[in-house]
Amino acid sequence: MCGIVGIISTRPVAPLIVDALKRLEYRGYDSAGVATLDGGKLGRRRAEGKLGNLEQRLSDEPLAGTIGIGHTRWATHGAPVEVNAHPHFSEEVAVVHNGIIENFRELRRELEAKGFTFSSQTDTEVIAHLVASHIKDGLAPQEAALAAIKLLRGAFALAVLFGGHDDLIVAARQGPPLAIGHGEDEMYLGSDAVALAPFTNKITYLEDGDFTVLTKTSYQILDLDGNKLERRQQISGGSAMLADKGNHRHFMLKEIYEQPEVIGHTLGHYLSFNNLQVNLPESGGLDFAKIDRINMTACGTAYYAGLTSKYWFEGLARLPVDIDIASEFRYREAPLSKDGLSLFISQSGETADTLAGLKYCEEQGQHLAAVVNVRESTIARASHSVFPTLAGPEIGVASTKAFTCQLSTLASLAVAAGVQRGHIDREREKQLVRDLSEAPRYANEVLHLEDTIAKLAHRLANKQHVLYLGRDTNFPLAMEGALKLKELSYIHAEGYAAGELKHGPIALVDENMPIVVIAPHDRIFEKTVSNMQEVAARGGQIILITDPKGAEAVGMDEAEIIVMPEMPEIITPIIYALPIQMLAYHTAVHMGTDVDQPRNLAKSVTVE
Ligand code: F6R
């Protein structure tokens, strides 16, 4: 949700800033811009659309200067057009910003009354004018920025550049992440350490309420009253390599194909395949036997992973789970059990709503645990117990491998909880570990279904609506399938618990409605098939994802069947996720949408 960069150097910075922005494009790709100081004078280039357009603009009209700031945008206030692209200027001040300024309307009115003219619809422009107004009132740049920041309400990570000051960037964090990178006679600022990886791995993460003053050779971190703060410098593990698609047409497809490997890595982190045991490294002293309830919070795909694991924790460990969408949880003042565990699931570890939920649980004195893919993220750093998913960087905006790695981690945690709470004996533990260890092999086998699925995807392309149905752990997967289809192909899709169909949604079913049914031949297979037959009776076009026993039992002529291998029940939501992902992927490819960067989306949602 917007990425920001700042660099002070002795060499030209515009190309360096663009390089860093490439690593932040996952945060937004509506427009991008760079501002530098050349001989003390501010200059900028901005371009609508993807970063490639800005690169082209810079190659047509290069920007000199050894100090600069840059931005890649996900629009909040104002359309994604060039005038709204950052950096925003006011006289001798340039600002880039990630977040939302909630009181921007009143600030804008006050500034307009003072004679400032606005050239964009953004909330960010008020920051530039506010700083400029304090400079006009006689404050030095650093003081002017601090005074302006104190007036802002909302969430921000921002950086400010001042005309005439070619060795000074000031920045602040209140919500969205921001990191300082330390180089040799160079200083950097970035929304994450990965953006700075080509330049340095020496990183200092700013915390909420931090204000920083950077020069080429020095940095200071202060609170908003100007008191000095100490923040630890650390070595980041972020890779300087820019991920590439390999031989795949899209990152998403590459990431789908990486799943056998990354599921294996993730499970290997939690399971010992030699003695068939679960281990919980980095559990931070967590003992599931002492927990009476888990309170889970997440958004989107991560929420569906959590919802799946509710079935596992409750079934295997008899441990009750309350799960909320983070944007709802953060404001509903949920009473939490004093012996409860608060668990947050997030690929990026930066999702604003999930982070707000974590802060609420922290205030309530809960033990905080996180299932995260980015180890250095804010959510990971704020948690007592960190359970990493070893998916590697996920570039495709639609989550695939992060989801199946979240499921792999959560299944392992649920088995560990069952063992610690005495509901899983040694023999059952061995069997469950054996079952989970089969997941990479099945994932690999299922990838061979891609051609069949690609053909079926043509049946979904250009439809108006699609329903997904499942029961038990395949109910969250039905919702995940619908989410994948809508975000990639822009087809309206809904996931339902199959048994809920006749309580309303069946009214939608007619011969134009494809229905994807996820139903391995398990203990509730018959129930799901009955729901499917109700759909078939009303002319709905069925795509059934099942195994050979399920296919034989159904024998319906009117259903297209994706035949999965027979597999242990605990891994079905992990493995059945793959055909669901491939179906959405191929539908989108068929329709010609932007698979890796679907419209209106961003990979890291750092505003609420
Ligand atoms: C969908 C998707 C999103 C994310 C959600 C949470 O494909 O990727 O729904 O799952 O925005 O993001 P994280 O996991 O980073 O907290």
Image (tube, rainbow, N blue to C red):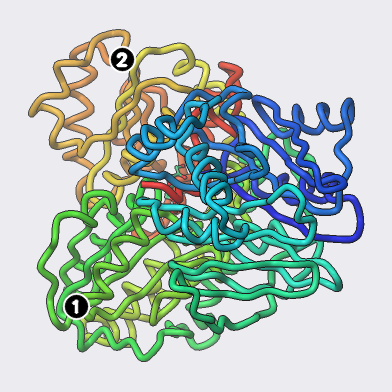
In the rendered image, is residue 402 in sight? yes
Q: Is residue 153 above or below residue 597?
A: below
- Residue type at mark 2: give it: Met
Quarter holding residue 8: bottom right
Is 56 placed left or right of 420 in the picture?
A: right
Outermost residue on the right side: it is: 11
Left or right, 510 with reference to 54:
left
Say whether disc 2 or disc 1 marks the residue closer to the N-terminus. 1
Q: Residue at x 24, y 79 (%)?
A: 366
* Other-residue count near label 2 (Cα within 10 Å), few / some / many at <14 / 14–19 / ≥20: many
Q: Position of residue 66 (x, y in %)?
A: 86, 53
Closest to the observer: 522 or 66? 66
Q: State the CA–CA distance, disc 2 to disc 1.
A: 43 Å
Q: Residue at x 69, y 72 (%)?
A: 237
Q: Vertical placement of 494 versus 291: above or below?
A: above
**Residue 176 image point, x, y percent:** 48, 56
Q: Left or right: where does residue 299 sit relative to residue 219?
A: left
Where residue 444 sits in the image (x, y, percent)?
60, 51
Most foreground residue, 495 or 372? 372
Question: Any mark on residue 340, and which?
Answer: 1
Residue 38 image-quadrant placement: top right
Residue 463, horizontal then vertical, whole percent: 41, 13
Q: Residue furthest top?
A: 511
Residue furthest bottom as drawn: 285
Give the secondary structure at mark 1: strand
* Residue 18 sits in quarter: top right
Which numbered dot is residue 513? 2
